[in-house]
Amino acid sequence: MRDFGRQVLDICGERVTAVFISIGSNMGDKTGYCLSALDRMDRIPGCTVKARSSLYRTEPVGVEGQDWYVNGVAELEVELTARVLLDRLLAIEKEMGRERRKKWDSRTLDLDILLFGSQAIHEKDLIVPHPLMHERRFVLAPLTELAPDLIHPVLGKTITELLEKVPDDGQQVMPLKGL
């Protein structure tokens, strides 16, 4: 099992935190938006994309009448606080045309902090681990690809165990070929 307590690394005297980000889009060039987001995250000072999952075509969850999503997960190493990282991710969403009109509306890009090392954060607009990640196949399937034995810091279960408990019904997740 991956030891989540060791997710804060000391590299050359600098504190680096392993972070997992959910990436999704259901408008326009969905795949292009997701790939561009990875590139933009890698250009954030103090942030390095270490790995990314495959991209998946996923059924919208909790809404009707929306186009299917493209989703994936990125593993980052950051020298930033969770708050600063969130601000940078929101700026990327906005740069790429995201308009926040109502909750769970269609979007060009959605970037969510899933896990920030082993930290549990409860602030007004920042909750980590992501409070719904354990209920969503579109998050757990790509996260399992990157870190199957990673232990959720609050629920105490591996990502694989969490994925096994989420029903397929209404949450189809299909790998996109060649990405």
Image (cartoon, grey):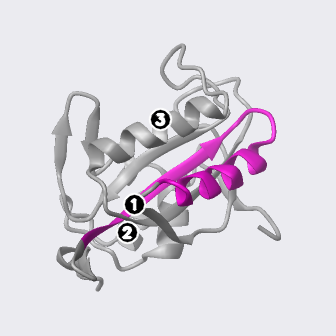
Disc 2/disc 3 C-alpha distance (Å): 26 Å
Q: Position of residue 179 (x, y in %)?
A: 77, 67
Q: Position of residue 77 (x, y in %)?
A: 39, 68
Q: Position of residue 137 (x, y in %)?
A: 51, 55
Say which residue label 3 marks: 90
Residue 131: tell me if it is visible: no
Q: Amino acid at mark 3?
A: Leu
- 12 or 2: nearer the viewer: 12
Residue displayed at 39% across by 60% down? 46
Residue 163: tell me if it is visible: yes
Query: Which of pointers 1 and 2 lies earlier in the amino acid sequence?
Result: 1
Give the extent of the magenta segment: 15-44
- Tag shown at residue 1: none
Q: Amino acid at mark 2?
A: Ile
- 112 or 148: nearer the viewer: 112
Residue 120 vertical placement versus 62 (above, below) = below
Categorize mark 3 by other alpha carbons within 10 Å: few (<14), some (14-19), many (20+).
some
Say which residue label 1 marks: 46
Disc 1/disc 3 C-alpha distance (Å): 16 Å
Query: Which of pointers 1 and 3 lies earlier in the amino acid sequence?
Result: 1
Q: Label 3, secondary structure: give it.
A: helix
Categorize mark 2 by other alpha carbons within 10 Å: few (<14), some (14-19), many (20+).
many
Q: Nearer the viewer, mark 1 or mark 2?
A: 1
- 9 or 160: nearer the viewer: 9
Residue displayed at 82% across by 71% down? 178
